[in-house]
Image (cartoon, rainbow, N blue to C red):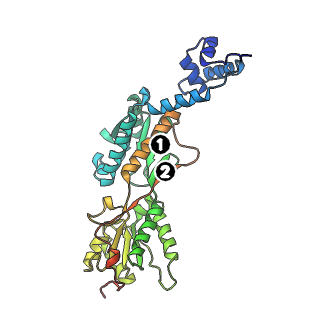
Amino acid sequence: MNSPPSTTLKHIAAHLDLSVAAVSMALRDHASLPAATIARVKRAALKLNYTPNSAGSALAAHRQQLRVRRDFSVIALVSNWPTREEWLRQASAQRLLAGATARARAYGYELQHLWARADGMTAARFSRVLTSRGIRGLILAPLAQPDSRLDLAWENFSTVTIERPVRYDHFHHVLPNYSADLRLAWTRLRERGYTRIGLVIETTMAERVAHQWEAAHAFEQSRDSPAIAPIPTLIVSETNPSPTIGAWLRQHRPDAVISRCNDVLPAVAGLQLRVPRDLGYASLNVVDDAPGVSGILQHRDVMGAAAVDALHALLHRNHRGPHAVAQGTQIDGSWHEGRTVAKPSRRSGAPPRHPA
């Protein structure tokens, strides 16, 4: 005995005098349709015993993921620094932009870098400009200060942030795995025979990474032998912190320093110490540090690509505004072999030289 023919979208459309596309959109709760139309379609689908074809639905979803909808083919990478070029001058920003641009092109998007302060714009006016240009997808570049404000009409946009801004932490955020990166630096330094490892960071950088570097550093120190007195972390906030760093080096005599502070190497040079013979230096972001440093390579190009991946998914789900539950993606760094940490074979175990 043959089974009765199943109800299709075409049957529902004919029953309601709607297009098949409108019925399909209503069953997916598309935001462009009135709530009354969505409810009417769902009532009819229930009445007519409509059951989605799982294979067809999966294929349609796959095809939808592969193409860019015409109504949001442009996505914006938004920066809000004091000048348009200030963020872009950083090497890490250039890598992030390159990674995001390449991934956007792979999907079929055009990615545009837009400066939120152009022509003295307010946040409200900038929101209107984005909307008038048909831009619904935003990637928010790292803010100049971790607690900076940029109060756009977020409810109108699908948004992903690079790093995790203090005031906007419920957007999907893509950031380095700060804790894992710090611990990787410790692992590589231990492999080379370093035992007295110190950490120097700037106050704003400590806040930007939510103090994860400090926490991971304290954990690694706790694994040392009780005979090795831990070196207190130095957090600097002065305009010229070199004297403070120099005094810290003289007092605690580390044999290696982990840092992301531009003043550490000048302070070391001021004490007439040679890197890496007298003191090892491992950067937590070699791309933005001095040339040739050893340390952590943050894969900002991969972060840019991951941000586009996340935004692409949000746009196709029609999700706008923040999430109810904070969520994000972490990208692990890798070790970069530079010239500021001794090779494992060259560490003799002799203590480093320090000035009296």
Which of the image's four quarters has the N terminus? top right
Inspect the image, locate mark 2, and give the three-letter code of the amino acid beneath it: Thr
Viewer-closest of 149 and 271: 271
**Quick check: can you spot residue 141?**
no
* Residue 356 in the figure: left or right of residue 180: left
- Between 38 and 84, the one nearer to me in the picture: 38
Instruction: List the single residue furthest toward the bottom.
Output: 356
Label 1 environment density (alpha carbons within 10 Å; few <14, some 14–19, many ≥20):
many
Density class for disc 2 (Cα within 10 Å; few <14, some 14-19, many ≥20) is some
Q: Is residue 249 visible?
A: yes
Residue at figure coordinates x 44%, y 30% from the top left: 67
Residue 319 in the image, given as x and y percentages of width and height: 53, 36
Please identify the quadrant where the C terminus is shown: bottom left
Q: Is 124 placed above or below 326 here?
A: above
Three-letter amino acid code of the residue under disc 1: Ala
The x and y percentages for residue 153 are 47, 37
Q: Which residue is mark 2?
A: 329
Identify the element where label 1 is drawn.
Answer: helix
Q: Do residues under tags 1 and 2 come within 8 Å of each other at their CB atoms?
A: yes
Q: Which mark is residue 310?
A: 1
**How far apart are labels 1 and 2 at the CA level?**
9 Å
Helix, strand or loop at disc 2?
A: strand
